């Protein structure tokens, strides 16, 4: 495989996390989120934005795929697979990652936790923008979330001895085309038994811009997601992550172009952490850069917010994946 040239080196070997007695315990979760590396997050974000655009119609899209695969290849414990689909003649590639379990043998094949972020980008709010030729750096939307997933793979690999095989990292494509990649993936999974192997979906999308406060929207889908919403809030408090969460009920998924939409409408408990849908107010000025050619790395103005979002997403997933 030819790897795109980039100034960023491959992900270094995993940093050992404190040993855990049981996967998903409070001790384990605290150790895991403590080793999320802000420098790694920033490095991945800048590399992804450097390809010019990750729109699937642009040459930079293939570079982004190569970069993600290159980083995952540096983690021996990462098991990588692809799910491909086509939307209106546009090829889309979802990248799915699990961490090969260590000493555990009782790995389940259902009730998995899906942790998602989309890696494609778009700049339709820039007048005259041409998908196949013009930039769409997507630093915030959603190189921030994609970088978090890459870092999760590294952190989970450091806890390999504790993993029981219940977390999937999903790098979804085509989210900006109305979540066509995640919807196609869900449809493909529903053709197998059990119909939906996922018990929960936690999505991280556009979490690096808010110069006013460490505030994000917590979007949940349908009454089946009420308990998951409350779990996210409890995790935020339990580990003193420090996010201010604004609850948003996605009563009409067509208004919320997020990769949780197809899962939520299928009845799977689903939540997204994002800044996108919050109205401008005293805690959020609105983001005038997303979906434009100006969504560049210098616009990631609140890296503390980004780190907190990464910690909350991973901590929630680890608790959900714990065997009781």
Image (cartoon, helix red, strand yellow):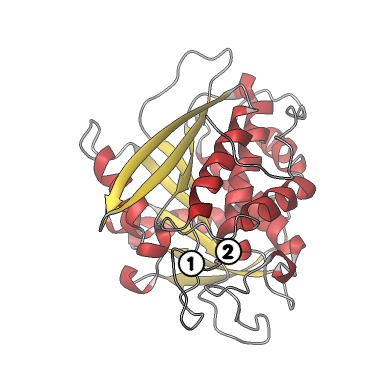
248 is higher (above) or lower (below) than 63: below
Q: Residue furthest left?
A: 191
Which residue is painted at 48% across and 56% down in the image? 120
Q: Which mark is residue 122?
A: 1
Q: Are marks 1 and 2 in contact (CB under 8 Å)?
A: yes
In the rendered structure, find residue 44 and report the number of the disc placed on it.
Answer: none
Can you see residue 251?
A: yes
At 71% across and 35% down in the image, what residue appears? 11
Foreground residue among 46 and 26:
46
Residue beneath the point at 53% across and 53% down: 60
Among numbered discs 1 and 2, the one appearing first in the sequence:
1
Asked whether the viewer can see residue 237, the reply is no
Q: Which mark is residue 138?
A: 2
Q: Count numbered badges in the picture.
A: 2
- Counting other residues with Cα less than 10 Å from the Cα at mark 1, is it few (<14), some (14-19), or many (20 or more)? many
Q: x%, y% of residue 309?
A: 65, 57
Residue 205 relative to residue 184: left or right:
right
Relative horizontal placement of residue 226, taking residue 238 as reference (left or right): left
Residue 321 located left or right of residue 49: left
């Amino acid at each position: 495989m030819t790897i795109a040239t980039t100034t960023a080196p491959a992900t270094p070997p995993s940093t050992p996390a404190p040993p855990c007695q049981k996967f998903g315990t409070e001790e384990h979760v605290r150790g895991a989120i403590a080793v999320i590396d802000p420098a790694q997050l920033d490095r991945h974000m800048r590399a992804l934005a450097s390809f010019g655009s990750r729109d699937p119609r642009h040459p930079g899209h293939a570079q982004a795929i190569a970069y993600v695969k290159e980083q995952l290849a540096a983690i021996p414990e990462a098991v990588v697979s692809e799910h491909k689909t086509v939307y209106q003649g546009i090829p889309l590639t979802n990248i799915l990652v699990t961490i090969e379990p260590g000493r555990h043998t009782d790995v389940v094949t259902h009730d998995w936790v899906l942790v998602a972020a989309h890696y494609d980008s778009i700049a339709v709010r820039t007048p005259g923008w041409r998908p196949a030729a013009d930039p769409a750096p997507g630093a915030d939307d959603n190189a921030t979330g994609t970088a978090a997933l890459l870092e999760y793979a590294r952190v989970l690999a450091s806890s390999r001895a504790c993993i029981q095989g219940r977390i999937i990292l999903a790098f979804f494509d085509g989210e900006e085309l109305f979540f066509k990649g995640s919807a196609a993936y869900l449809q493909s999974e529903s053709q197998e038994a059990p119909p939906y192997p996922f018990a929960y979906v936690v999505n991280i999308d556009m979490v690096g811009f808010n110069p006013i406060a460490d505030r994000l929207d917590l979007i949940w889908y349908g009454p089946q997601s009420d308990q998951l919403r409350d779990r996210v809030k409890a995790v935020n408090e339990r580990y003193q992550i420090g996010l201010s969460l604004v609850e948003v009920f996605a009563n009409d998924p067509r208004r919320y172009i997020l990769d949780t939409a197809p899962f939520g409408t299928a009845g799977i408990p689903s939540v997204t952490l994002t800044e996108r849908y919050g109205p401008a107010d005293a805690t959020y000025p609105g983001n005038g850069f997303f979906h434009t050619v100006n969504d560049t790395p210098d616009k990631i103005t609140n890296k503390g917010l980004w780190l907190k979002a990464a910690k909350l997403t991973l901590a929630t997933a680890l608790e959900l994946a714990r065997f009781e």
